[in-house]
Image: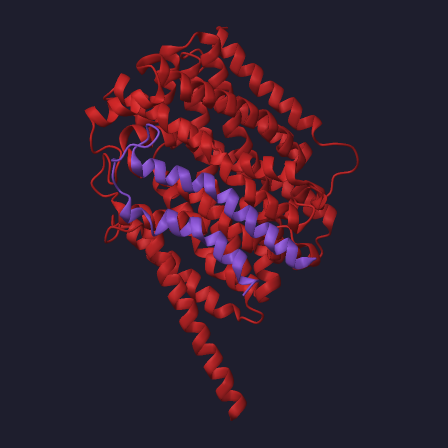
Chain colours: A purple, B red
């Protein structure tokens, strides 16, 4: 289970950027001046390093 | 000579010198030329990969798409991120395999993993056929950037010839390490240029990015949700395109091979963690495209939107700076494409045909020779057949992505035969070519390449199941 956790973590942003799109295809609400669709995509792009970083950290912990 | 032209030429010359000096000391061999002796740390691998991702398409295409198509352009922001997530898992085992077996190119991997020279030659062929129009497009983009940014002081064709001859010079001399050094010049100037115009132009005309977007939503209410300014690029197209291009990202021969230059597999993983941050400049380029739509509506060629707005809004020296950054943005990917295409031809098509008797020195000379040949072909295409090959470029990405099943299986499955992968690859390419050439892209609202990839994966899995069953039957008999 622990070995699978990094993989699951890393695929959260992928899921949001692919399967999530049909549900966020709208302009409202405007967040930080950005239309909602653009905000959603940008937020998940910026969150990806956090998810991948955590996955890296967990995988390295297993190696030791 | 005008001020913008002088600035642009200065950039091109400085980049060339950096590329030539970046070679370092010692004798050049194929291992150094193609994969930098596999000694690159996080910084050089990052620069190299980032250097290949930001092409003239980012500058001109992303702003042009934001200008004319609107929301469908957002796929550009998302697909790279999908590519990095996949690379986080795919590239480290690939790097270990490449290190153990001394691989230089993508067909090397297919040959080592599947033991089929037919498959390796097929992959090399599809790779080169896809790279040449991509290379051509970089050159055409370079010509457009320099001509417009210099205010017409130099013709597009002259700029293309000059910049490309210099690019060839540093690739020929220095190989991949020279390219990585030029990528530093390119990335710094590109980021500065994009940050200044991405924030500056909306502020100049509307008093801020938020105000510009509010005005855009008022004037063009449907522009910022799919399908934006198009009729065919709905959510289904965007989702299938993100999937296709995300999976195809590291299937490009040059992206695939750039991973080989890393010094260890952790470098590659760390690189995948930080790379998504590098998507931010694309957002700023979108802002420029949106501003151009409001300030300069009705442009005949949307790809010129960014340059038209920049030359109109800034003094000449800054237009020259943007033009110089744009020119180097074409030179770096062009140099990597050139390097990889020539190694593919020399190592995976020329050497098998010679049947042995090709030592490393001979191969190195052959690679350099083919480099000059491919450069001439791309130059001729860029000067005499512009625009027509845009269709070929679309086929390029769609065609390259068909390697994905073979790469994933080669990395993850212990024993797999060549035949299912060959059948899947051929079926995928056939679907892609027939859909694009018959005008059925998008097909049922989905990207044609994605349809091809779905067929490819299904055929591969079916053929694998068939092979395994017959194998078992034989054992039972």
Given residues B374 and A48, the one toward you in this image is: A48
Q: Is residue B161 visible?
A: no
> In this image, B383 relative to B387: left or right?
right
Above or below: residue B444 compared with residue B277? below
Provide residue A45's location: percent of width, then percent of height: 44, 40
Provide residue B79's location: percent of width, then percent of height: 42, 44
Above or below: residue B401 compared with residue B466? above
Above or below: residue B138 compared with residue B423? above
Identify the residue at image location x=36%, y=25%: B287
Given residues B209 and B7, the one toward you in this image is: B209
Outermost residue on the right side: it is B26
Identify the residue at image location x=24%, y=50%: B445
Provide residue B43's location: percent of width, then percent of height: 64, 36
> In this image, B5 relative to B262: left or right?
left
Provide residue B475's location: percent of width, then percent of height: 54, 89
Q: Is residue B71 visible?
A: yes
């Amino acid at each position: 289970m622990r070995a699978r956790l990094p993989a699951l973590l890393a695929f959260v942003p992928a899921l949001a950027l692919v399967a999530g799109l049909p549900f966020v295809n709208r302009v409202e609400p405007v967040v930080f001046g950005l239309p909602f669709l653009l905000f959603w995509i940008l937020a998940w792009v910026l969150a990806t390093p956090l998810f991948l970083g955590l996955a890296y950290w967990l995988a390295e912990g297993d190696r030791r | 000579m005008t001020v913008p032209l002088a600035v642009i030429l200065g950039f091109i010359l400085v980049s060339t010198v950096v590329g030539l000096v970046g070679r370092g000391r010692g004798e050049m061999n194929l291992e150094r030329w193609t994969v930098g002796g596999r000694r690159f740390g996080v910084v050089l691998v990052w620069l190299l990969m980032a250097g290949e991702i930001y092409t003239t398409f980012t500058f001109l295409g992303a702003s042009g798409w934001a200008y004319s198509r609107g929301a469908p352009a957002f796929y550009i922001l998302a697909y790279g991120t999908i590519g990095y997530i996949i690379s986080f898992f795919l590239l480290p085992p690939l790097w270990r395999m490449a290190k153990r077996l001394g691989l230089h190119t993508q067909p090397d991997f297919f040959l080592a993993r599947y033991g089929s020279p037919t498959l390796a030659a097929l992959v090399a062929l599809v790779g080169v056929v896809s790279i040449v129009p991509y290379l051509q497009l970089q050159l055409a983009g370079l010509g457009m950037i320099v001509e417009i940014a210099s205010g017409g002081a130099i013709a597009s064709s002259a700029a293309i010839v000059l910049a490309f001859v210099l690019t060839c010079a540093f690739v020929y001399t220095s190989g991949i390490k020279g390219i990585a050094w030029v990528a530093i010049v390119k990335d710094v100037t590109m980021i500065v240029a994009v940050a200044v115009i991405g924030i500056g132009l909306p502020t100049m005309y509307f008093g801020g990015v938020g105000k510009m977007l509010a005005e855009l939503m008022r004037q063009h209410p449907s522009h910022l949700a799919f399908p934006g300014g198009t009729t065919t690029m709905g959510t289904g197209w965007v989702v299938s395109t993100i999937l296709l291009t995300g999976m195809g990202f590291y299937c490009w021969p040059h992206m695939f091979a750039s991973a080989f230059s890393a010094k260890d597999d952790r470098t590659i993983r760390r690189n995948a963690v930080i790379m998504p941050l590098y998507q931010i400049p694309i957002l700023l380029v979108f802002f420029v495209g949106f501003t151009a739509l409001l300030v300069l509506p009705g442009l005949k060629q949307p790809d010129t939107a960014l340059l038209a707005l920049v030359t109109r809004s800034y003094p000449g020296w800054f237009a020259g700076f943007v033009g110089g950054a744009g020119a180097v943005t074409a030179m770096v990917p062009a140099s990597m494409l050139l390097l990889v295409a020539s190694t593919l031809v020399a190592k995976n098509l020329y050497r098998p045909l010679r049947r042995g008797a090709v030592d490393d020195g001979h191969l190195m000379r052959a690679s350099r020779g083919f480099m000059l040949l491919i450069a001439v072909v791309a130059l001729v295409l860029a000067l005499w057949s512009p625009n027509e090959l845009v269709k070929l470029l679309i086929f390029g990405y769609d065609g390259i992505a068909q390697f994905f099943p073979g790469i994933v299986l080669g990395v993850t499955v212990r024993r797999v035969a060549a035949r299912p992968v060959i059948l899947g690859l051929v079926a995928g390419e056939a679907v892609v070519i027939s859909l694009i050439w018959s005008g059925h892209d998008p097909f049922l609202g989905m990207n044609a390449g994605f349809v091809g990839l779905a067929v490819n994966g299904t055929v591969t899995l079916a053929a694998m199941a068939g092979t395994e069953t017959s194998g078992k039957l034989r054992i039972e008999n």
